[in-house]
Image (cartoon, grey):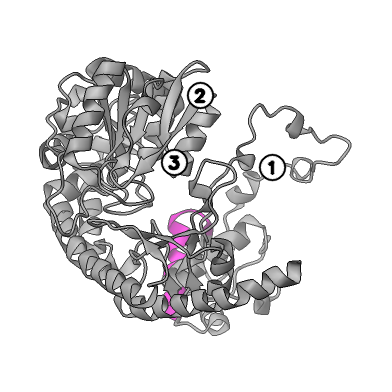
């Protein structure tokens, strides 16, 4: 064994102990040490440039976890039991060859990779000006409060609440908090039997599509709209009716008559951000009853109205059971949390629960337990108040910056949202601006994939602000304005060159 080959490239965000342990566990699994002893704690500390005490703590921890054994006067060795857990070499070396490879392309009944999707830049956090939607600045997550709730949930006295297999049952504590603390703010009264927890709104749509639709079902979807929702219903082989919008959201009338289900985002239409006014909500509910369709309400961004009081949800106005309500904790708290809920008739929730059981039983019970504590302790409401203040400041900075630097663009008026929907001046293409902006470390999202129609409009962009620092907003918009002017000057030359 060569001691000098053991190296750890320490990264920020993890302790030295954690990173050394990860490296040693990896080497142990690869049988790097064989039957030889590991370097002494003193030698390992010298190799890695850390204190001897740090290495000793790692070694002792691995002994406790039975990765290592300690022999007096001889040092630390890999536990012989580890090697017996490995697969036989003949199995490890079995690889797929062209001769024995199965062609999966011939067996696929659906090809999701061919669907029109919104692609997110996974390296968004490296941009100086990340005008991306759906992400948050890590510094604003209530880490201390979430960690405290996690500590309580994982204490010995509470572990029984989430360690068991509950099959199809949701956390009573979380359901209670949703009923008592969240739904009343949207004007909704519901029993526990009318609520189902999901893995987020997207998963809610998937459950509904699987249970309620087939090849004969007609589902009305907003256009532009949420591409994952569109693809979920498309994958279910549903007939899709793409609905026209105006400055009040979905247009009621003849285009809805043939629908069995109509999906809407009345609080802030995705992605135009317009809010459906009360008179349009009443029209929609009346037509649902008259033409016998069901409304699927995605109460998207209901908590971010900055200049007017939020309107009541469609579900709160529904006295005929024609609204299925989809809510989420992910957007307001953490996109990675993946916790949502459906509110609907008891009979429907019962069948959705049975379907969910066949797919994944229930959302992770530990996340449910922590979320219930987070809400019950008042942390959720406190977080929403802080975030509303923060995002209102950002929204105002965005609004002022867009008026100042993007006067040549058409900006959709809104009462609030986490983003702005912008139409570029003709004949510019959003894809050209996205590419050019990336050269200046500006991340902009093209709106092309949000349209269902083909060919889709090519001159819309969406500017999100939840992930960008306040002091970067105006400068980023100023640069964007200059880049748009640059493209306007270059475009006639490009057309001339093409001809």
The kind of secondary structure element at disc 2 is strand
Q: Which residue is mark 2?
A: 239
The span from disc 1 to disc 3 (Cα, nearest Å) is 52 Å
> Taking 297 as reference, is 9 left or right?
right
Q: Which residue is mark 1?
A: 87
Residue 171 in sight from this viewpoint: yes
User: In the displayed structure, would residue 367 be above or below residue 220?
Assistant: below
Q: Where does the image place residue 75, in percent across and percent down from the top left?
A: 55, 69
Residue 314 in sight from this viewpoint: no
Dots 1, 2 in contact, CB < 8 A: no
Q: Earlier in the sequence, mark 1 or mark 2?
A: 1
Span of residues in magenta: 52-68
Q: Which residue is mark 3?
A: 223
In front: mark 1 or mark 3?
A: 3
Q: Where does the image place residue 67, in percent across and percent down from the top left?
A: 52, 56
Q: Where does the image place residue 27, in percent across and percent down from the top left?
A: 62, 62
């Amino acid at each position: 064994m060569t001691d000098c080959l053991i190296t750890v490239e320490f990264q920020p965000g993890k302790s030295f102990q954690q990173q050394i342990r990860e490296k040693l566990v990896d080497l142990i699994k690869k049988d790097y040490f064989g039957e030889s002893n590991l370097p002494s704690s003193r030698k390992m500390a010298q190799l890695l440039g850390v204190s001897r005490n740090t290495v000793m703590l790692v070694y002792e921890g691995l002994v406790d976890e039975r990765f290592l054994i300690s022999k007096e006067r001889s040092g630390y060795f890999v536990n012989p039991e580890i090697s017996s857990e490995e697969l036989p070499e003949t199995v490890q070396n079995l690889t797929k060859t062209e001769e024995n490879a199965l062609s999966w392309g011939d067996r696929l009944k659906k090809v999701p990779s061919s669907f029109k999707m919104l692609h997110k830049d996974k390296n968004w956090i490296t941009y100086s000006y990340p005008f991306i939607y759906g992400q948050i600045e890590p510094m604003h997550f209530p880490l201390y409060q979430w960690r405290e709730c996690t500590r309580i949930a994982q204490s010995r006295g509470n572990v029984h609440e989430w360690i068991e297999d509950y099959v199809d049952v949701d956390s009573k504590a979380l359901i209670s908090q949703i009923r008592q603390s969240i739904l009343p703010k949207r004007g909704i009264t519901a029993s526990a039997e009318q609520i189902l927890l999901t893995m987020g709104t997207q998963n809610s749509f998937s459950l509904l599509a699987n249970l309620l639709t087939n090849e004969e079902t007609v589902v009305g979807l907003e256009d532009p709209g949420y591409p994952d929702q569109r693809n979920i219903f498309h994958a279910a082989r549903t007939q899709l009716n793409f609905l026209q919008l105006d400055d009040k959201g979905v247009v009621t009338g003849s285009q809805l008559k043939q629908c069995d289900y109509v999906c809407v985002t009345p609080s802030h239409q995705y992605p135009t951000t317009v809010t459906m006014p009360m008179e349009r909500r009443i029209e929609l509910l009346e037509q649902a009853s008259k033409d016998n369709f069901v409304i699927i309400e995605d109460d998207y961004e209901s908590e971010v109205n900055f200049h007017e009081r939020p309107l009541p949800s469609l579900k709160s106005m529904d006295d005929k059971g024609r609204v299925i309500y989809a809510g989420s904790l992910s957007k307001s708290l953490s996109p990675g949390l993946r916790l949502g809920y459906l509110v609907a008739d008891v009979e429907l929730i019962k069948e959705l629960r049975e379907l969910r059981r066949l797919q994944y039983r229930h959302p992770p019970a530990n996340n449910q337990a922590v979320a219930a504590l987070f809400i019950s302790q008042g942390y959720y409401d406190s977080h929403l108040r802080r975030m509303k203040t923060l995002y209102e400041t950002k929204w105002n900075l965005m609004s002022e910056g867009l008026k100042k630097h993007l006067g040549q663009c058409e900006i959709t008026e809104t009462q609030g949202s986490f983003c702005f929907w912008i139409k570029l001046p003709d004949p510019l293409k959003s894809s050209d601006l996205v590419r050019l902006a990336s050269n200046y470390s500006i991340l902009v999202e093209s709106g092309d994939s949000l349209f269902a129609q083909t060919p889709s409009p090519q001159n819309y962009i969406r500017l999100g602000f939840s992930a960008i620092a306040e002091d970067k907003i105006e400068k980023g918009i100023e640069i964007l304005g200059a880049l748009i002017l640059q493209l306007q000057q270059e475009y006639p030359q490009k057309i001339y060159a093409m001809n």
